[in-house]
Image (tube, rainbow, N blue to C red):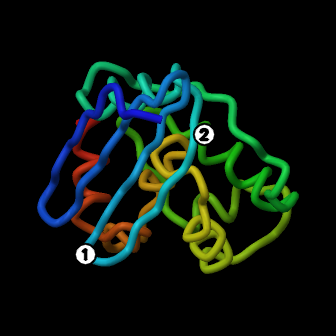
Amino acid sequence: MDLMKTDIRSYKEYTIRVGIKESVEFVEIEKTNSKETNQFSSDCGKQILTYLNGGLKEIKCEINKDKLTDFQKLLFKKINSIGYGEVRTYQEVANSLEKNCLPITVGQALSKNPFPIIIPCHRVVKKDSIGEYKFGKDLKKHLINLSI
């Protein structure tokens, strides 16, 4: 399958690629030797590109939730309710869940988010700092700053 179109966004040591292969798009986020790749629909890939260019405030994509735990489904639904330009602390998210959980539980579950950017886990921060992010703090800051 030949690559028809690729859009690349670089931020420091990170490269975000969105490519169209016929009707399927891929998203890759790279940092040094690690790589995360997910397959999305063509429309979803276009939404991600538009979001990264600052032209979209919310990504609405169908994602396969079959492999998610019940807790992840509940948590990701809560994370999706955090508006563009807003952040919540791990503590606030933990307190808002129906299940009584600890902030560290929220952080651990978000670190396994298979749909970064689509499920905007970058909008969850520590009460006294930006917190961790699967692809590094610099990229997390960059994604938050897109909405400011």
Disc 1, SS: loop
Give the CA separation, mark 1 to mark 2. Answer: 29 Å
The crowding category of the residue bearing disc 1, from other C-alpha atoms within 10 Å (few below 14, some 14 to 19, many at least 20), is few
Residue 8 placed where, x, y %? 22, 41
Q: Position of residue 98 (x, y in %)?
A: 84, 56
- Work out whether residue 43 can be spotted: yes
Residue 50, located in which quarter of the rendered image? top left
Image height of 129 relative to 55, above or below: below
Q: Position of residue 14 (x, y in %)?
A: 23, 61
Question: How many numbered callouts?
Answer: 2
Q: Is residue 92 above or below residue 74?
A: below
Q: Residues within 10 Å of mark 2 (few under 14, many from 20)?
A: some
Evaluate if marks 1 and 2 touch, with contact meaning CB atoms under 8 Å apart: no
Mark 1 or 2, closer to the camera? 1
Residue at the (78%, 51%) spot, across then down: 73
Q: Which residue is mark 1?
A: 32
* Res 20 → quadrant: top left
What residue is shown at x 23% (from left), y 28% (from top)? 53
Quarter of the image that includes the C terminus: top left
Task: Give me the disc on residue 80.
Answer: 2
Q: Nearer the viewer, residue 106 or 118?
A: 118
- Name which residue lies at 61% across and 37% down: 81
Instruction: Indicate the secondary structure of the residue bearing disc 2.
Output: helix
Q: Amino acid at mark 1?
A: Thr
